[in-house]
Image: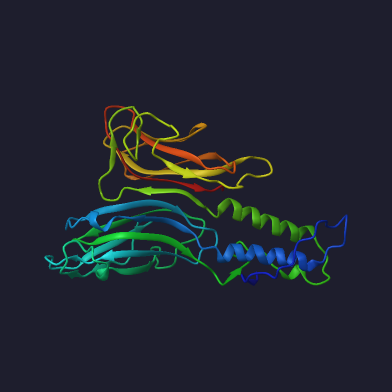
């Protein structure tokens, strides 16, 4: 075990040849190790965000869940935080509006929003920002490399029209518990051992697999679900039933240089939060190449359902169309979907 810094390495270029073709200075590899530690510890990732036009914010005093999502934390995450832009509640309400996040089944601290004399809180002078750290059931920061659901519930006229869920960075890493490389073996004049190179390469590969970059996140803007009660697939964005087309409503993805030496595909997790009135339903992700993946057997429990797929890693963007259906004459209710780059 060792504590390593995550500071920016010095600009020392890697050699063109190593071991059998030329003598390599250990400091070259020390700089490579320092660069890996910097990427692991200082990466600041946005998991999800959603914005609602202030004029569209509801003034309802009814309790409702307005946003849902699914995330996977990075291997080395200090904290997962949420920053919200909120507006005061209607002046006619006698109690503060409340906003409560639930993460992995754990309700976070209640955020109270005061009332003010304003019709819908559309005056920017009345807006304010709230920042909150997400915690687990023990009050500790969320664990790394962990998948979890989250949702935002509002009550008593609370109005949230913007939020971002993101990770914060470390200033140093522990090689015993983080994805980090010990720099000391690559000291001045040190031998370049296969053991140390293997540690460097393995750490880089793990970060490539498990940093969980987000390609897609989308959630309904209020409590109203997208529904479908037939076997015909319906686009979740515009209700079209014509399937994929270059002009269809969808999400553009760009898995830039995500292929490996053995594959040109980018491993991803597809997820959807949905349920059915009875029976089962499906959520389908389609690209220009055809069906990317189908989340099948969505049941009556409202939760995140997932499947894995391989997204082509060509260095050009592609359109992904997301559609929902039901296997019988029942109803599938769809609330959110996404795509995360991840491989176990």
**Residue depicted at x 44% and y 53%:** 71
Seen in the image, is 262 located left or right of residue 84? right
Above or below residue 222? Residue 236 is: above
Above or below residue 161? Residue 10 is: below
Number of numbered callouts drawn: 0
Above or below residue 230? Residue 310 is: below
The picture places residue 170, in percent across and down from the top left corner, at 54, 69
The picture places residue 245, in percent across and down from the top left corner, at 43, 32
Task: State the quadrant of the N terminus.
Answer: bottom right
**Residue depicted at x 36% and y 30%:** 233
Report the front residue among 174 and 335. 335
Q: Quadrant of residue 15?
A: bottom right
Seen in the image, is 255 located left or right of residue 226? right
Report the front residue among 200 and 337. 337
Colouring convention used in this rendered image of the protein: rainbow
Seen in the image, is 69 located left or right of residue 79? left
Report the front residue among 4 and 314. 314
The picture places residue 80, in percent across and down from the top left corner, at 44, 63
Q: Is residue 176 visible?
A: no
**Residue depicted at x 38% and y 51%:** 69
Q: Is residue 8 visible?
A: yes
């Amino acid at each position: 075990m060792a504590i390593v810094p995550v500071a920016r390495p010095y600009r020392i270029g890697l050699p063109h040849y190593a071991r059998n073709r030329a003598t390599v200075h250990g400091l070259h590899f020390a700089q490579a190790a320092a660069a890996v530690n910097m990427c692991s510890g200082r990466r600041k990732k946005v998991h999800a965000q959603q914005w609602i036009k202030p004029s569209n914010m509801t003034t309802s005093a009814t309790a409702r869940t307005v946003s849902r999502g699914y995330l996977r934390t990075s291997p080395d995450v200090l904290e997962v935080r949420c920053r919200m832009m909120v507006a005061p509640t209607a002046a006619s309400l006698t109690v503060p509006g409340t906003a409560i996040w639930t993460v992995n089944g754990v309700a976070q601290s209640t955020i109270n929003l005061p009332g003010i004399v304003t019709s819908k809180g559309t005056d920017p002078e009345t807006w304010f920002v709230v920042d909150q750290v997400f915690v687990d059931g023990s009050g500790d920061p969320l664990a790394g490399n962990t998948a979890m659901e989250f949702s935002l519930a509002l009550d008593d006229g609370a109005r949230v029209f913007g939020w971002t869920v993101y990770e914060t960075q470390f200033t140093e890493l522990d090689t015993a518990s983080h994805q980090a490389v010990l720099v000391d073996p690559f000291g001045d004049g040190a031998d370049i051992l296969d053991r140390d190179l293997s540690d460097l390469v393995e750490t880089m590969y793990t970060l490539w697999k498990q940093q969980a970059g987000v390609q897609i996140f989308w959630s309904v803007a209020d409590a109203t679900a997208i529904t479908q009660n037939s076997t015909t697939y319906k686009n979740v964005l515009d209700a079209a039933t014509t399937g994929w087309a270059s002009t269809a409503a969808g999400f553009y993805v760009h898995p830039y240089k995500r292929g490996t030496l053995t594959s040109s595909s980018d491993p991803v997790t597809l997820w959807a939060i949905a349920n059915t009135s009875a029976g089962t339903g499906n959520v389908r992700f389609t690209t220009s190449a055809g069906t990317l993946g189908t989340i099948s057997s969505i049941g009556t429990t409202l939760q995140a359902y997932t499947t894995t797929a391989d997204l082509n890693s060509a260095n050009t963007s592609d359109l992904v169309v997301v559609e929902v259906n039901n296997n019988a004459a029942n109803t599938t209710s769809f609330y959110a979907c996404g795509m995360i780059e991840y491989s176990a």
